[in-house]
Amino acid sequence: MSIEIDVLNGDSSWPRAEPLMQAVWPRHVVEKLSWGHVKWAHADLRVLIDAPEDAERPGLACHVGIYFRTAIWDGRKVQIGGIGGVSTREDCRGRGYATLALNAAIRTLRDHEAVRFAMLFCEPHNETFYQARDWHAFNGEVYAEQPEGRIRFEAMAPYVFDFTRKPRDGIIDLCGLPW
């Protein structure tokens, strides 16, 4: 069995990712979550993994969105990467697809030499998954731009992955910058 991992342009690959995202995160479920009101940016790149050919159901099994942004960390302008929209089809869970896709996303961000660290936001039940993959809790404040303006982002816990900087606290400001 071979697994193919594609890293594709975010906008052009959205039609392929959208059915998976809607299946994993249907509107009626999302609207009840702590982050259901958040307006998320579109991914710059997407890691897509198809189910193996011998799978019960063919098609997209896993998705991870990749973002490249300029942020302000403790008053300093810094290039960061972001991870979002990590989703695995229910019948494909527990097979390591999310880990493979996340690793491919990290490699892609690492290859972008300007990125100092990566960031993601996760729900409490996913924290051990990310911690086991070298993500660290960010214990500071994060600000983001939303339709209602600049907000302190508290809908989910922020986590960081170190490349050349090791932010664990302070202030990360994503406002006024395309996030």
Image (cartoon, rainbow, N blue to C red):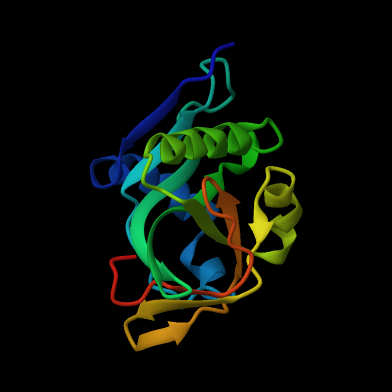
Quarter of the image where the C terminus is located: bottom left
Q: Quadrant of residue 113?
A: top left
Q: Is residue 179 left or right of residue 47?
A: left
Residue nearer the viewer, 5 or 157 = 157
Give residue 171's position: percent from left, percent from top.
Answer: 52, 76
* Number of numbered markers: 0
Give residue 77's position: percent from left, percent from top.
Answer: 36, 66
Query: Which residue is drawn at the image coordinates 53% and 28% (left, top)?
Result: 57
Query: Which residue is drawn at the image coordinates 47% and 67% (left, top)?
Result: 27
Q: Is residue 137 left or right of residue 103?
A: right
Q: Is residue 24 left or right of residue 66?
A: right
Give residue 26's position: percent from left, percent from top.
Answer: 50, 61
Query: Which residue is drawn at the image coordinates 72% and 51% (left, top)?
Result: 131
- Say if 150 sits above or below 50 in the image: below
Query: Which residue is drawn at the image coordinates 46% and 51% (left, top)?
Result: 116
- Say if 69 sits above or below 13 in the image: below
Residue nearer the viewer, 165 or 81 = 165
